[in-house]
Image (cartoon, rainbow, N blue to C red):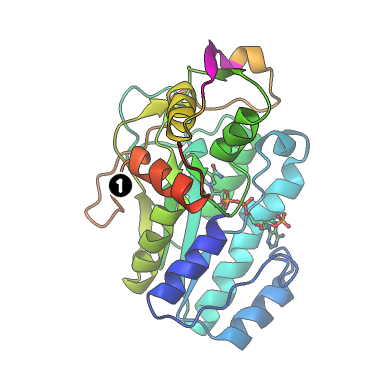
């Protein structure tokens, strides 16, 4: 999902972009990674690849860590050898979600899920004096499955839905995050950076806004995460703030949602 928008943002910024899907490059294969970097000779690598099945990671932590942790080390080694700058995407799930004010880059990490641990392993596989880790949360965009896409699908199938109201974060439109990642690559930014937005909301609030934006009458019931009984716990409070001047300040999620609905050609008429 994010990779497609980063490809477009890089091209729009005038860069010669080599976009590699999984079929082109298995990141867990160190020699394939080294060959890909040697052949492309990039100035920068923006790593959007990941094991993103949060629930599936609970029973497959080794496989998730191979992609989200160990493979990031392969990428870092190859990039260092060829002088390419790495911008790596990470997540709010490295925090435990028990915070009461937006998480800053220097706050201690304490993942509560296998996915969160695997992503933290990826952050630690990088030399942060030479690479950037950009933590983002609650992504939605045209290029893949996400919460907004699920709500739009449900809007065509039923009149009522239950959505949790006990998780709070910033929904982040990949169309907004992608150019920010390209800019960080251009600037050869280093260290941990949080992509922060405006106006935190719950999934319930976000769902209501999606149905309103799509012009769909839907009864939205408030639910709790415990009722969902999903294998992986989610952080309750996922709001990312920043203490770094270089960190991306993204447009608010309402703006992102409007852009997404427009991109998906969803109209309220
Ligand atoms: N989605 C969110 O809400 C969210 C929130 C915070 C942070 N993030 C982070 O943002 C980044 C982008 O997420 P996204 O939502 O765009 O993810 P996505 O749509 O699931 O894309 C991840 C891509 O990585 C590929 N991949 C998986 N294993 C690979 C491997 N061994 N070698 C090469 N490619 C591999 C996947 O290929 P297949 O499809 O073939 O498996 C997929 O194309 C990730 O780092 C994610 O952790 C996401």
Depth check, front residue: 237 or 200: 200
Q: Can the viewer see residue 105 in this picture? A: no
Q: Find residue 146 and report its horizontal and vertical position in percent.
A: 59, 41
Residue in view at x 25 percent, y 50 percent: 244
Q: Can the viewer see residue 116 in this picture? A: yes
Q: Residue 243 lies in magenta, yes or no? A: no
Question: Where, by quadrant of the figure, is residue 15 drawn?
Answer: bottom left
Quadrant of the rendering where the N terminus is positioned: bottom right
Residue in view at x 54 percent, y 37 percent: 148
Q: Is residue 241 left or right of residue 173?
A: left
Depth check, front residue: 187 or 159: 159
In the rendered view, tell whether residue 263 sits above or below residue 151. Answer: below
In the rendered view, tell whether residue 250 sits above or below residue 179. Answer: above
Residue at the extreme front: 269
Q: Is residue 221 left or right of residue 249?
A: right
Q: Find residue 125 and report its horizontal and vertical position in percent.
A: 55, 58
Residue in view at x 48 percent, y 83 percent: 16
Q: Find residue 106 and report its horizontal and vertical position in percent.
A: 33, 42
Residue at the extreme left: 245
Q: Residue 221 lies in magenta, yes or no? A: yes
Judging by the rendered image, the residue that carries numbered circle 1 is: 251
Q: Find residue 45 and report its horizontal and vertical position in percent.
A: 50, 71
User: Please, what secondary structure does the residue beneath circle 1 have?
Assistant: loop
Within 8 Å of ligand 1, the CB of disc 1?
Answer: no
Q: How many marks?
A: 1
Residue in view at x 43 percent, y 28 percent: 212
Which class describes the residues within 10 Å of circle 1: few (<14), some (14-19), or many (20+)? some
Q: Is residue 177 left or right of residue 123?
A: left
Q: What segment carries the magenta color? A: 217-225
């Amino acid at each position: 999902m994010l990779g497609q928008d980063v490809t477009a943002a890089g091209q729009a910024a005038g860069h010669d972009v080599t976009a590699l899907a999984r079929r082109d490059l298995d990141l867990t294969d160190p020699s394939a990674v080294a060959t890909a970097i040697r052949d492309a000779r990039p100035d920068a690598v923006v790593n959007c690849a990941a094991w993103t099945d949060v629930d599936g990671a609970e029973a497959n932590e080794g496989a998730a860590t191979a992609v989200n942790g160990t493979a990031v080390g392969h990428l870092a080694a190859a990039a260092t050898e060829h002088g390419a700058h790495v911008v790596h995407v990470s997540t709010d799930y490295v925090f435990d979600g028990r915070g009461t004010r937006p998480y800053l880059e220097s706050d201690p990490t304490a993942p509560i899920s296998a996915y969160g641990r695997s992503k933290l392993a990826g952050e630690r596989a990088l030399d942060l004096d030479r690479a950037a880790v950009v933590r983002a949360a609650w992504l939605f965009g045209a290029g893949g499955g996400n919460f907004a896409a699920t709500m739009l699908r449900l809007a065509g199938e039923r009149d009522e839905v239950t959505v949790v109201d006990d998780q709070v974060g910033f929904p982040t439109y990949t169309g907004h995050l992608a150019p920010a990642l390209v800019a960080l690559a251009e600037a050869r930014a280093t260290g941990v950076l949080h992509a922060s937005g405006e106006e935190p909301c719950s999934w319930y609030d976000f769902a209501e806004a999606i149905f309103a934006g799509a012009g769909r009458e839907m009864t939205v019931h408030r639910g709790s995460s415990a009722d969902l009984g999903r294998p992986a716990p989610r952080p309750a409070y996922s709001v990312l703030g920043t203490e770094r001047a270089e960190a991306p300040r993204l447009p608010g999620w309402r703006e992102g949602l409007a852009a997404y609905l427009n991109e998906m050609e969803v109209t309220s008429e």
